[in-house]
Every structure is written in C-alpha cells, then in structure tokens.
C-alpha cells in the first residue's frame, strides 16, 4: 500500500484551502461577470433547459404548436421537449435553478474537484506536491473556463476526482467500502458523461485487482441502471440515447447526419485524425499551465518502482492514457467550446503527477541555468496560464454579448409580448424559449423563405417582429 506522509510532512492546510476558496470565488466572478451567467453554446443551453425541467419535477414537457418553427440546437422536440444529453449535469444544475443561482453550480463543482485532487496528492506525495496540484489544476484555462460555464465537463471531472480519491483511500486502508463509494462516484459520472466514466472504469484495470473491479461495479450499478431507465423514459428504450432522437432535428437544421460520437471509422479519416492531433496540441500548449504535460511525464518517471506512491502513479497514468487513446475513435470537429474539453478528465492525473515532475525538473534546471532562472521559469509558466485565459476571454466575452444581444435588444425595445422571427444564418442558435414555450415573447427559428404574413396567420392576435442578425441586432415590428 502507498504510505501517507507523516503529520509533520503535511504542513499547514490553511494555504491550500484558502487557495481553493479563492479559486472558487474567481470561477464564480468569471461566470457571473465575464460570461454573464449565459449558456452561450447549444450544449450549455440544452443542459440548462433540462435543468429547468428537473427543477419543476419533470422529465420533459409537451411540444408546442408548430415545433418545426421552434427548433433549437441540441434540444429534442418531437411530441415532447427535452435535452439530448444525459441527466447528471442538469440534475445538479437544477439545484441552482431552484435556488435562483444556476451560475454558481459549476464553480462549486470545481471547488470539490480541487479539494479531492489536493487531498489525494497530499496523502501520497506530500504537501508541496499537493499545493502544486491545486495550482496547476485550478488555474489551467480549461478547468477555470469550464468551472465558470454550464458545460458538463466540470461535474464529470468532480465525480471522477472523487472516484480517484476513493481509490487512493482503498490503497491506503484496504477497506472494501472505498471502492464501492468510488463506484458510486463513477456511476454519477456515467449519468453525466458516460464515455468519461467508462474510460475511468477501464483505467482501473491498472490496479490489477478483480476485487476492486467488482466492488466498483457494485457501487456504480444503481446509477447505470438509473441511466438506462432514464433513456427508456425519455427516448423509448434503455439503449436509445438522445443523440439518435436528435438526429432528425440535426438533419433538418444543418442538412447532414450528426454521426455517432464514437466510431472506428474515425481512425481512417484524415480530417478526424488531424483534429485529434490538434486537440492534443491544444491541451498541451493552450489549455493547461505551460509545461504541465511535460512535468507530468517527468513525474511519472520520477516515481520509481519502490516508491510508496507507485500504485497510485499507475492508476494516474491509466486515467490519462485511456481517454487519450479513445480520442482517436471519437468525433473531434471544432465547436464553440474549449478545443480540448473532451480531455478534461486528464487534468486530474496531470495535476497529481506535476509535483514530483517539478522536483525532478527543478534539480536538472538548476544545474543548467542556475536557481534564479529556474524560479523565473516557474513564475513565467504560472503567469502564462491566466494570460492564455485572458486571450481566450478576449474573444469569448464579445461572443457571449453578441449571442445574448438578441434578447437584450428585445428588452431594450420594450417588447413585453409577441413573436420574434429570427433572421440569421443559424437561427436555431438563438431561438431559446425554455422548455415550456410559455414566455410572453416567443422566438421563432422559421425558414428564411417564410413570410411575416404566414407567421401572423399561425399566431393570430400577437404582434410579429423581425430580428435581423448583425453586430447589433435590429428588431422591427412587422404586424
């Protein structure tokens, strides 16, 4: 078993806990101020819509009249309205919706993930490595951005960080309850992002313990069963997911098939393989603290076969490598999220291994360039992460303002009820009416050849407006 550091080695917990709290406040400010508490992408809005349903105690809502005019990205609208995505992230977000603070949910999830990684690293590698793990994870642009958004990657990272911690506790105590609790965390991750949970479960093979595998499966089983039951209720079969249900809508909007997120055919697609390599490049060079990937590799090598943390190192490597391998059989087209977001869970092992990686690298650097340049290198890397985040926000903040601009312009025009016909290149990115379509202002993603008079005939007695896309939306009453 891996030995835990002694009490004298642990050092004060005040600094890391204070840092975690400050990072959580930073994510909340970023969510509320910079990102305007607004679900920018279709993925985010779809999960938010499902959270609104869950907050009302509902799985779905009846479809409105003329659903073909009300399509919105990533939302299934046939006889019913519901998200195409698994329910886990939305279930947690629903708590924030009920409290009137939905934007605070992912920052809290980020704090929990940081605390789990800190405590695990502390137990195996000591206080300095644990503090560094908090730093490189907490200020990584990928982690910070997603902890301020509504994407499902933060909750799944939280659940798998807790599962990672549970496996650490099993290694140190041998108690059978920890793999069961870890399995429950994996099950919650499965309810959130099934693929990420499955890759973590495969990574457990690195422990070479059939007992851990079946105890983990025992803990995960109720949640996997709940997920299959959810699919049966939402999409008609335990094995029918929202991606298939959404396929007709996607074809109607974009004129093409979505393609399944996983396929062996991607291995022979030059376009997809180029995308996969670009995702890896983005993770290593843009979305982590500069040098983190190299530090983790060095750290893995620095933990020798006789090191008490060797078994945890093996698990960390597997948790990093399995999602990386599965990336090559998954779709990786560019979208409006962070380029490397499908590798979010690899941030856990990268953070865990960074401490020993820095200790080994620091010694080598000092012999080459001296202690001052070594310290300057560390400072430059830590400064580089928020600079990179600032560069990304420099693009994202005006994009959020623009996508929210339609609704802001309608409010500014004093429009309190009516129908707004969206005239834009992709109107389904803006036609956000909530799951019940009962708000005073209804937004239509009508076909471009549909006239205002035809719309008025479908919605008699309601004022009809046209909203034209531009750097500033132009909203004009037509009927």
Image (cartoon, rainbow, N blue to C red):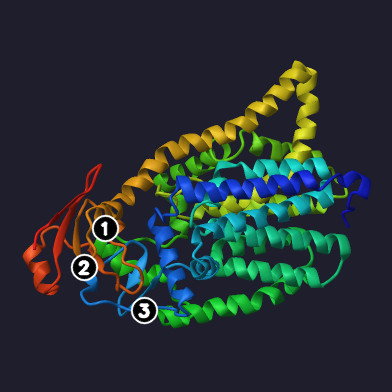
In the displayed structure image, the side of residue 139 where residue 472 appears, left or right: left
Q: Sequence-wise, which precedes: disc 2 or disc 1?
A: 2
Left or right, residue 95 beside residue 346: left
| Residue linked to disc 1 | 254
Residue 224 lies, in percent from the top left, at: 59, 75
Q: Return the disc, 1 or 3, that comes first in the chain's sequence.
A: 3
Give the image location of residue 442, x and y in percent.
24, 66
Residue 132 vs 167, above or below: the answer is above
N-term mark: 3 or 2: 3
Judging from the image, what secondary structure is the residue with disc 1 in?
helix
State the CA–CA distance, disc 3 to disc 2.
17 Å
Where disc 2 sits, the SS reads helix
Look at mark 3 in the image and give the residue it sits on: 61
- Residue drawn at x 8%, y 68% is 454
Q: Residue at x 55, y 67 (%)?
A: 92
Answer few, some or many: residues within 10 Å of disc 1's Cα (few below 14, many 20 plus, some between 14 and 19): few
Q: Are marks 1 and 3 in contact (CB under 8 Å)?
A: no
Question: In front: 456, or 208?
Answer: 456
Q: Is residue 231 left or right of residue 211?
A: left
Q: Can residue 237 be seen in the rendering of this structure?
A: no
In this rendering, the answer to whether 91 lies above or below 341 is below
Report if the CB atoms under discs 3 and 2 are less than 8 Å apart: no
> Which image quadrant for residue 137?
top right
The N terminus sits in image quarter: bottom right
Closer to viewer: mark 2 or mark 1: 2
In which quadrant of the rendered image does the C terminus lie?
Answer: bottom left
> Marks 1/3: CA distance?
25 Å
Q: What x and y, as percent, mark residue 56?
A: 45, 77
For disc 2, the marked residue is 69
* Local secondary structure at mark 3: strand
């Amino acid at each position: 078993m891996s030995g835990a550091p002694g009490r004298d080695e642990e050092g004060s917990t005040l600094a890391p806990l204070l840092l975690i709290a400050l990072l959580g406040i930073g994510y909340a400010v970023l969510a509320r101020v910079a990102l305007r508490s607004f679900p920018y992408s279709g993925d985010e809005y779809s999960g938010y819509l499902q959270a609104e349903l869950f907050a009302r105690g509902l799985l779905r809502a009846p479809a409105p009249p003329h659903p073909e005019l009300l399509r919105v990205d990533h939302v299934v609208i046939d006889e019913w309205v519901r998200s195409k995505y698994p329910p886990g992230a939305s279930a947690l977000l629903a708590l924030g919706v009920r409290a009137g603070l939905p934007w605070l949910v992912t920052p809290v999830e980020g704090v929990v993930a940081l605390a789990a990684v800190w405590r695990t690293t502390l137990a195996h590698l000591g206080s300095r490595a644990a503090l560094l793990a908090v730093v490189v994870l907490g200020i990584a642009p990928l982690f910070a951005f997603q902890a301020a958004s509504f994407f499902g990657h933060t909750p799944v990272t939280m659940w798998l960080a807790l599962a990672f911690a549970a496996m650490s506790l099993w290694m140190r105590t041998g108690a059978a309850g920890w793999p069961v609790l870890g399995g429950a965390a994996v099950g919650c991750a499965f309810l959130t992002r099934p693929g990420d949970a499955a890759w973590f479960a495969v990574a457990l093979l690195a422990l070479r313990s059939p007992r851990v595998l079946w105890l983990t499966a025992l803990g995960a089983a109720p949640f996997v069963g709940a997920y299959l039951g959810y699919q049966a209720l939402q999409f008609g079969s335990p094995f029918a997911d929202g991606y298939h249900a959404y396929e007709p809508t996607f074809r109607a909007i974009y004129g093409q098939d979505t393609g399944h997120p996983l396929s062996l055919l991607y291995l022979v697609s030059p376009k997809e393989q180029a995308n996969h390599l670009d995702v890896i490049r983005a993770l290593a060079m843009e979305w982590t603290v500069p040098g983190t990937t190299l530090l983790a590799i060095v750290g893995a090598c620095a933990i020798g076969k006789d090191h008490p943390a060797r078994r945890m190192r093996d698990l960390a490597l597997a948790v990093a490598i399995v999602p990386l391998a599965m990336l090559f059989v998954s779709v990786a087209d560019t979208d409006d999220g962070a380029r490397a977001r499908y590798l979010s869970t690899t941030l856990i092992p990268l953070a865990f291994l960074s401490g020993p990686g820095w200790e080994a690298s620091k010694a080598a650097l000092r012999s080459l360039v001296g202690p001052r340049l070594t310290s300057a290198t560390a400072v430059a890397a830590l400064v580089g992460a928020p600079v990179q985040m600032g560069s990304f926000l420099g693009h994202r903040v005006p994009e959020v303002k623009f996508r929210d601009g339609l609704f802001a312009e309608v409010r500014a025009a004093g429009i309190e009820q009516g129908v707004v016909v969206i005239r834009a290149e992709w109107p389904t990115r803006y036609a956000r009416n909530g799951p019940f379509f009962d708000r005073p202002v209804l937004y239509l993603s009508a076909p471009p050849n549909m006239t205002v008079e035809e719309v008025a005939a479908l919605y008699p007695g309601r004022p009809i407006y046209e909203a034209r896309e531009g750097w500033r939306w132009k909203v004009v009453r037509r009927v």
